[in-house]
């Protein structure tokens, strides 16, 4: 979906169309919250997800700031996915605003299928989306970003060299700003240059595992299936920053984002009829190393306050020592049914969670 949160807000506030709008926190640019998403008009000023609201206000004095409204976003998420399922039900849900669809058994041509999907979503939601159709998930993901907003891009193996290889290496999901900079330092700017790079050179700078992955994706190789059915083992939310956050200067923004992600996880649990006994936080640093901390709870819970408190405990247990490119919150060890002590089922006395 195109700038999903912002697009939903513009449906309700059409007078803001074509104006710079940023969604985040409580909508107060003087707060310590971060931008969740921004309209394309705001992005022209350099405003992007993960940016502190105060900095966004400095970049664009005319930017309109709105609070997040997850109830509205989930409503439109359900509507667009239901509309999509009328065209093709083999869908892998990838979050509130993105899905993969398995079209391999369809006999219609790709352009007709893509147009049908876009039309169904537009009619059901009045929102636009960008569709990428390709032989695998890797190339479909790249394709979906090529002609935003309201795009339809079809890529085959024959287009690899002409359409994919000229793109910046950072267009591949998994190659972030730091990896891009390291690739540039050794003379690799595009996907095509990465595809013909020396394996020994890549291994020297990126290690064996990551260098092998870099070569595979540069050649458009991805064997991951579209996973349409799975029993929930966890619920998680994460976000990758366009610019890495500093572990000390941006600590307030980091904590604010952990709170926002925790609230989303709690709502996902409630919507699915789950409660969780374990809450965890994941951090990915600018050198692609990862650190996690988990906290086991004394009772299952799905209340936002409980998830927020547990996630912040996990965050405090991490030694943030490098710039951060990704933050995530995860709830696991799920149980079906209504947890004890929720707001819908208060208890006269309640043992502490931890």
Image: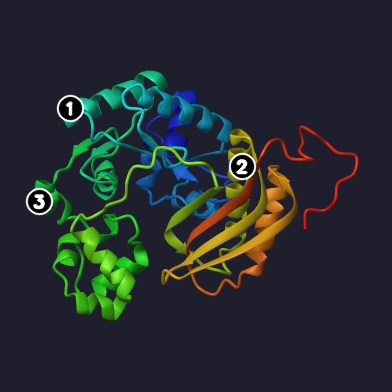
What's the CA distance linking mark 3 and mark 1?
26 Å
Relative image position of residue 275 (x, y in whole percent): 67, 43
Question: Would you name the residue on which mark 2 appears?
Answer: 26
Disc on the earlier residue, 3 or 2? 2
**Label 3 element class:** helix
Is 179 above or below relative to 30?
below
The residue at 33%/68% (across/down) is 179
- Residue underneath mark 1: 107
- Comparing labels 3 and 1, the label whose residue is closer to the camera: 1
| Residue 42 coordinates in the image, percent (x, y) | 40, 43
- Relative placement, left or right, of 238 versus 204 is right
Q: Nearer the viewer, mark 3 or mark 2?
A: 3
Does the CB distance between marks 2 and 1 fall below 8 Å? Answer: no
Q: Earlier in the sequence, mark 2 or mark 1?
A: 2
Question: SS class of the residue under badge 1?
Answer: loop
Task: Work out which residue is located at the far top of the displayed protein and give it.
Answer: 123
Q: Position of residue 295 (x, y in %)?
A: 68, 60
* 206 horizontally vs 220: left or right: right
For the residue carrying disc 2, how many other residues have a C-alpha within 10 Å: few (<14), some (14-19), or many (20+)?
some
């Amino acid at each position: 979906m195109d700038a999903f949160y912002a697009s939903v807000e513009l449906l309700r506030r059409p007078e803001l169309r074509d104006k710079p709008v940023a969604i985040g926190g409580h909508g107060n640019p003087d707060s310590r919250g971060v931008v969740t998403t921004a309209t394309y008009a705001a992005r022209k000023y350099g405003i992007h997800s993960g940016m502190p609201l105060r900095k966004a206000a400095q970049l664009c004095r005319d930017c309109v700031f709105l609070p997040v409204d997850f109830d509205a976003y989930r409503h439109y998420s359900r509507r667009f996915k239901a509309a999509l399922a009328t065209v093709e039900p083999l869908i892998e849900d990838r979050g509130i605003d993105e899905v993969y669809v398995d079209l391999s058994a369809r006999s219609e041509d790709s352009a007709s299928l893509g147009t049908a999907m876009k039309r169904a979503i537009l009619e059901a939601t009045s929102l636009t989306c960008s569709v990428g159709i390709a032989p695998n998930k890797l190339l479909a993901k790249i394709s979906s970003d090529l002609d935003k907003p309201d795009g339809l891009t079809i890529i085959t193996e024959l287009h690899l060299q002409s359409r994919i290889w000229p793109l910046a290496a950072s267009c591949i999901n998994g190659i972030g700003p730091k990896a891009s900079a390291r690739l540039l330092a050794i003379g690799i700017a595009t996907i095509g240059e990465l595809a013909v790079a020396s394996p020994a050179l890549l291994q020297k700078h990126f290690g064996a595992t990551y260098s092998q992955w870099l070569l595979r994706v540069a050649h458009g190789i991805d064997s991951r299936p579209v996973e349409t059915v799975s029993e929930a083992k966890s619920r998680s939310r994460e976000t990758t920053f366009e610019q890495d956050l500093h572990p000390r200067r941006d600590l307030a923004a980091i904590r604010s984002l952990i709170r926002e992600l925790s609230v989303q996880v709690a709502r996902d649990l409630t919507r699915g009829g789950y409660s969780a006994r374990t809450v965890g936080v994941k951090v990915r640093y600018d050198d692609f190393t990862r650190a996690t901390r988990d906290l086991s709870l004394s009772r299952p819970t799905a209340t936002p306050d409980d998830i927020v408190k547990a996630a912040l405990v996990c965050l405090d247990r991490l030694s943030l020592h490098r710039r951060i490119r990704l933050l995530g919150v995860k709830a696991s060890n799920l149980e079906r049914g209504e947890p004890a002590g929720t707001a819908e089922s208060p208890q006269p006395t309640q043992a502490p969670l931890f």
